[in-house]
Image: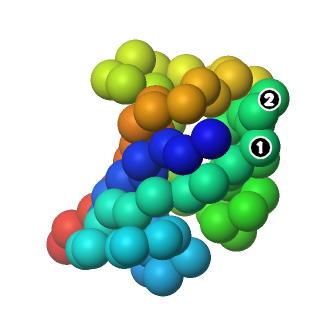
């Protein structure tokens, strides 16, 4: 299944792992029954850097399941200076 991924702030340094990456977003093709945790593991995201994760604009936890066509976003703890 194909899903859209958004990586904000310093997390966008992992965007090179996404297909058709443009800026902070891109696509992943994933197996059915994928969870948010599977995505963080695949992208090598450090959970201490993540403030929140959402699917289609709804805040979720690591065990949330992903469905075909979902949009998953990861927001960092802090950004800026």
63 vs 24, left or right, is right
Toward the left, the furthest residue is: 81
Residue drawn at (25%, 74%) of the image? 23
Residue 45 versus residue 31 in the image, above or below: below
Residue 20 versus residue 65 in the image, above or below: below
Cβ atoms at labels 1 and 2 below 8 Å apart:
yes
63 vs 54, left or right, is right
Residue 48 seen in the current view? no
Residue 5 versus residue 24 in the image, above or below: above
In front: 59, or 47? 59
Residue drawn at (45%, 33%) of the image? 69
Residue 27 versus residue 60 in the image, above or below: below
Q: Secondary structure at mark 1?
A: loop
Write down the residue under mark 1: 31
13 vs 64, left or right, is left
Q: What is the x, y in percent for residue 22?
A: 27, 73
Residue 81 seen in the current view? yes
Q: What is the x, y in percent for residue 17?
A: 56, 76
Write down the residue under mark 2: 33
Position of the C terminus by quadrant = bottom left
Q: Label 1 to label 2, Cα distance in Å?
A: 6 Å
Q: Secondary structure at mark 2?
A: loop
Q: What is the x, y in percent for residue 29?
A: 62, 54
Residue drawn at (44%, 51%) of the image? 5
Residue 20: quarter of image: bottom left
Mark seen at residue 81:
none
Q: Residues within 10 Å of mark 2 (few under 14, many from 20)?
A: few
Q: What is the x, y in percent for residue 32?
A: 76, 33
35 vs 19, left or right, is right
Position of the N terminus by quadrant = top right
In front: 38, or 76? 38
């Amino acid at each position: 299944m194909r899903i859209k991924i958004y990586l904000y702030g310093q997390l966008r340094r992992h965007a090179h792992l996404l297909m058709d990456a443009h800026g902070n977003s891109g696509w992943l093709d994933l197996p059915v029954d994928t969870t948010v945790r599977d995505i963080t593991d695949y992208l090598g995201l450090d959970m201490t850097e993540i403030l929140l994760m959402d699917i289609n604009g709804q805040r979720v936890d690591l065990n949330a399941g992903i469905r075909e066509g979902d949009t998953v976003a990861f927001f960092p703890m802090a950004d800026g200076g």
